[in-house]
Image (cartoon, rainbow, N blue to C red):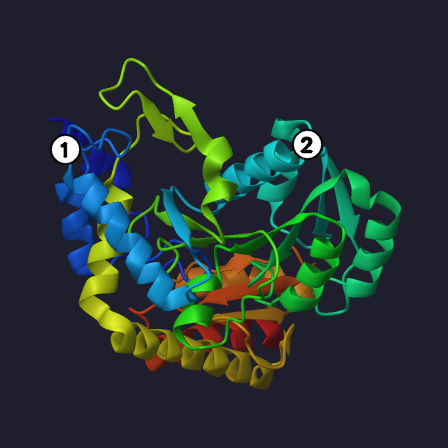
Amino acid sequence: MLAAWTTVLRRGEQGPCRAAGSMVAEPLPVALEAYTAYAAVNLNDPDTWPSVSALVAELSSLLRRLLGPWAAAVIPTGGGSESVLTALYAARELTGRDAVAASAAAHASVAKTARLLGMRLLRVPVDEELRMDVEALEALLEREGRRVAAVVVTAGLTDNGAVDPIAEAAEAAWTHGAVVYVDAAWGGLPLAATGRLRVPRGGPLLLGLDFHKHLVPPPSGALAASGEPLLEPLVFEAPYMPLGRQLGLPWTRTAAGLAAAVEALHRLGTQGLELLMERLYRLAGLMTRLGEEAGAEPLLPRPETPLAALRVGERLGEALSAAKRRGWVLYPSSVPGALRYVAKWCHRVSDVEEIAEAIREALRG
């Protein structure tokens, strides 16, 4: 009865593949199988389900291979928002400071986390392509450095896909004793898999990336740390559980996302993941070119992550509607008059051409 009811509720809704502006992935079939197998397993009870510990250990190994040996410790999360909350909580506890610095274009989860943790959010200006202004960051830290627990830099903005100057911002942060948090929820997987991500060394660093934006069902992500001590504030007593303690902020939660991520990364392998992500970059590049030919203005001349953001001005509503008539859901960017296309493994060149034609139709009026 319930299955029939939920089937009726979903009737007429698009799947993730056709939601071409959404950052929720069309899951790989093998990932969906693994997700289902672990849906009823509690990630926070590895004593009862020992395979959870094996999955965490395997994820740690896979991410060290992907990100580099600096990733000394890894914990699974539900995705970017949880990773931000976890990282900034740890930074606050470790430093005893009460402020966080982030660019004016940082994801909304940063402001939400600052509010939840009672931290002051210090906004750093951005350039015309929404990247953090490092000189402005340095000036801010000269004034407020003693209070800043963490500096947040973004590896792939959800507005236009741009990547902040991570190394320069990290150097400024470490000079003033702050923890660096790299928000790589959107861009981390494609950037790392294709050799485009350069993670600096020299101080405390946490990095969050999502798997459900490219490969698996949500929620699925991970938080990597440059050293075990960064995760010490995340150990909590849980006397009612077999182990008596837990690592991370949430309590009971499914291990499905973790299992799906490990299965997907295993099946693809290093080379397969790189080939898949390069294909996404090509699709985003094609959308950028075709969108420009249709009369839209790319927010970036060349995608830095597998995302194409196009300014269509006052015709934004018409462009979204034209795409929807063809069965595609695009999203507006927070940049006024702009929309975004998110490349997915299930998309074909002909799909990109169809979406671009919808934009052309809208701009012609």
Of tags 2 and 1, the one toward the viewer is 2
Camera-side residue of 300 and 144: 144
Q: Is residue 251 above or below residue 111?
A: above
Question: Which residue sits at x=16%, y=49%?
Answer: 34
Residue 206 percent location from the top left of the image: 53, 51
Can you identify the residue that label 2 sits on?
96
Is there any visible trace of residue 215 in the rendered image? Answer: no
> Residue 183 vs residue 37: left or right?
right
Numbered disc 1: secondary structure: helix
Q: Circle 1 is placed at which residue position?
A: 3
Say what amino acid the circle numbered 2 marks: Gly
Residue 354: image location, x then y, percent:
40, 76
Of residues 291 and 97, the one nearer the viewer is 97
Answer with mark 2 or mark 1, whichever residue precedes in sequence: 1
Q: Position of residue 209 (x, y in %)?
A: 44, 55
Numbered-mark total: 2
Q: Who's the residue at 22% across and 48% down the image? A: 55
Which residue is found at the position 32% from the left and 54% from the top?
60
Q: Nearer the viewer, residue 109 or 247?
A: 247
Percent across and percent down for residue 123 are 77, 48
Comparing 229 with 254, the one in front is: 229
Report helix, strand or loop for mark 2.
loop
- Mark 2 neighbour density, 10 Å: few (under 14) some (14–19) many (20 or more): few
- The CA span between labels 2 and 1 is 49 Å
Residue sitting at the far top: 240
Q: Amino acid at mark 1?
A: Ala
Residue beneath the point at 68% across and 27% down: 118
Q: Quadrant of residue 53?
A: top left
Quarter of the view holding residue 326: bottom left
Name the side, left or right, on which 18 lies relative to 51: right
Is the C terminus in the top left, top right, bottom left or bottom right quadrant? bottom right
Q: What quarter of the picture does the N terminus occupy?
A: top left
